[in-house]
Image: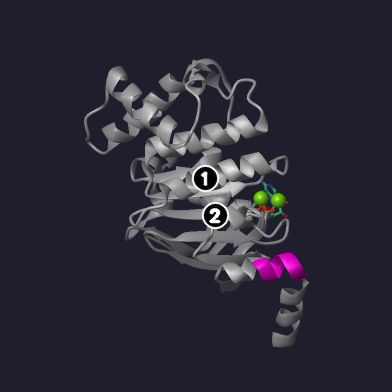
Amino acid sequence: MLKIENLHVRVAGKEILKGLSLTVNAGEVHAIMGPNGAGKSTLGNILAGREGYEVTQGSVEYFGKNLLELEPEERAAVGMFLAFQYPVEIPGVNNTYFLRAAFNAQRKKRGEEELDSMQFLKRVREKLKVLHLKDELLRRAVNEGFSGGEKKRNEIFQMAVLEPKLAVLDETDSGLDIDALKMVADGVNQLRSPDRAFIVITHYQRLLDYIVPDFVHVLADGKIVQSGDKTLALKLEEQGYAWLQQRKLADT
Ligand code: ADP
Ligand code: MG
Ligand code: MG
């Protein structure tokens, strides 16, 4: 589904990603961990197609196509969901209205029929039920006055409605409490399926107690320095990242 090879990315004149490679297949959940400043969010932003990130080397293929050529909306239309794309507050704009616009824009780009408001409402109600969310979420303005936890809830709700093929979640919000972490994890677990993949960027080992990843990768100094299964996350929790640096020194 996604194949990143030898990716080098420069931000504000500084090289941040320095040869990152990662392959993600359908059905897999990959966790990306790593010290602060390693480039985790930069990876997320590159996948999202944010401006200001210059790829100087390497490639990113998504279903065999060059992802880097696609505009952010085109990425959404081909099934990518970048959680942090929609955390903005849009006062006065009803959440359901906003989501339907996003949903239909994607369908239109794919040449599919748009859903009318009744059809869409039916769909969102089903999703609310699956995720155990309250109806109230539909009527509120997009993220307006939402607490950190409510924003998370809304993000997972958006993801459920848009039914992405590849969801990228960057859990940068250090204010997340345990309920919010569980909420994110439940949402991901509910949406796990053989044709859907997740990249969960996190520095919370705890999140991975709830989302059991198929693979854990450590991103340090702009590349993936170690990959393993879920036990790698436990090792990081116990020993921090220092042992990786020592290993690197030993290798040189
Ligand atoms: P992480 O998410 O792993 O903590 P980031 O990808 O956010 O790391 O940042 C990696 C490095 O890139 C940091 O040193 C950060 O200061 C720098 N960086 C990221 N975005 C920008 C930007 N827009 N302008 C300047 N420096 C940036
Ligand atoms: Mg950071
Ligand atoms: Mg970050």
- Report if residue 98 lies within the magenta region: no
Q: Say which quarter of the image contains residue 163.
A: top left
Residue 64 locus on image (x, y percent): 32, 61
Instruction: Please tell me which residue is depicted at 52% across the width and 41% down the height of the picture.
Output: 83
- Where does the magenta region start and end? 234-239
Which is more toward the observer, 45 or 146?
A: 146
Which is more toward the observer, 5 or 165?
A: 165
The answer to whether marks 2 and 1 mark residues whose Cβ atoms lie closer than 8 Å is no
Instruction: Please tell me which residue is depicted at 51% across the width and 23% down the height of the picture.
Output: 137
Instruction: Please tell me which residue is depicted at 38% across the width and 44% down the height of the picture.
Output: 164
Which is more toward the observer, 149 or 166?
A: 149
**Three-letter residue code for mark 2:** Ile
User: Label for residue 186?
Assistant: 1
Q: Quadrant of the C terminus?
A: bottom right
Residue 198 locus on image (x, y percent): 47, 54
Q: CA distance from mark 2 to mark 1?
A: 8 Å
Overall secondary structure of the magenta section: helix
**Would you name the residue on which mark 2 appears?**
211
Q: Secondary structure at mark 2?
A: loop
Vertical placement of residue 145 versus 9, above or below: above
Vertical placement of residue 20 versus 209, above or below: below
Could you classify mark 2 by the number of other residues whose Cα lies within 10 Å: few (under 14), some (14-19), or many (20 or more)?
many
Indicate left or right for 86 with 38 as reference: left
Q: Secondary structure at mark 1?
A: helix
Judged from this view, the residue extending furthest toward the top is 92
